[in-house]
Image: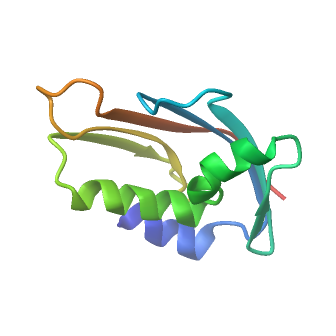
């Protein structure tokens, strides 16, 4: 909550970031995509339409925070997240909903974040 509040107060309106996902998601294709967010609109100019659609729900920092809230609402047995100290954006998080269940783990990282 504190990181999300920092983001709301200090986060830039225009920014770029690379999203990387690791999971047992059963999809083919890249697991990273570079997003550019301008005036609240996200694009991925170098990605295929399939990749953009696959990661649309994570295509902006506000959407990543929404994904974190959804994960926490499911009461996972393990959750860990790190946030940028200045602006609050998530550097990454990992979640395991049931430790004794295989293939339900999910991890996300945000790299190469640049305010524009």
Residue 18, position in %: x, y?
70, 40
* Residue at far left of view: 100
Describe residue 75's horizontal placement relative to residue 63 as left or right: left
Q: Using the rendered view, name the quadrant where residue 56 is placed.
A: bottom right
The C terminus, quarter of image: bottom right
- Count the numbered circles shown: 0
Residue at image position (62%, 49%) is: 55
Up-down: is 33 above or below 65?
above
Is 35 placed above or below 111 here? below
> Relative to residue 99, is residue 51 depicted above or below?
below
Q: Residue at x 81, y 41 (%)?
A: 48
Q: Is residue 100 left or right of residue 4?
A: left
- Whole-percent x, y for residue 112 in the image: 72, 38
> What residue occupies the far right of the structure in this picture?
45
Q: Classify residue 44 as left or right of residue 98.
A: right
Q: Quadrant of residue 8?
A: bottom right
Q: Position of residue 61 (x, y in %)?
A: 59, 59
Residue 38 sits in quarter? bottom right
How is this picture coloured? rainbow
- Work out which quarter of the rendered image holds the N terminus and state it: bottom left
Foreground residue among 10 and 38: 38
Asked if 37 appears above or below 94 in the picture, the reply is below
Residue 13 screen position, x and y as percent: 74, 71
Does residue 113 appear anywhere in the picture? Answer: no
Residue at x-position 79% and y-position 48%: 49
Q: Which of 33 and 101 lies nearest the eye of the viewer?
A: 101
Which residue is painted at 73% across and 73% down in the image? 40
Q: Is residue 72 at all visible to an observer of this figure? A: yes
């Amino acid at each position: 909550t504190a990181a999300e509040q920092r983001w709301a107060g200090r986060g830039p309106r225009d920014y770029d970031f690379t999203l990387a996902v690791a999971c047992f998601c059963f999809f083919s294709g890249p697991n990273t995509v570079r997003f550019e967010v301008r005036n609240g609109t996200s694009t991925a100019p170098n990605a295929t339409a399939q990749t953009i659609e696959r990661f649309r729900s994570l295509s902006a920092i506000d959407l990543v925070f929404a994904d974190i809230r959804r994960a926490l609402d499911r009461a996972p047995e393990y959750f860990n997240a790190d946030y940028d100290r200045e602006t609050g954006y998530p550097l990454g998080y990992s979640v395991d909903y049931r430790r004794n269940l295989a293939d339900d783990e999910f991890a996300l990282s945000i790299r190469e974040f640049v305010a524009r």
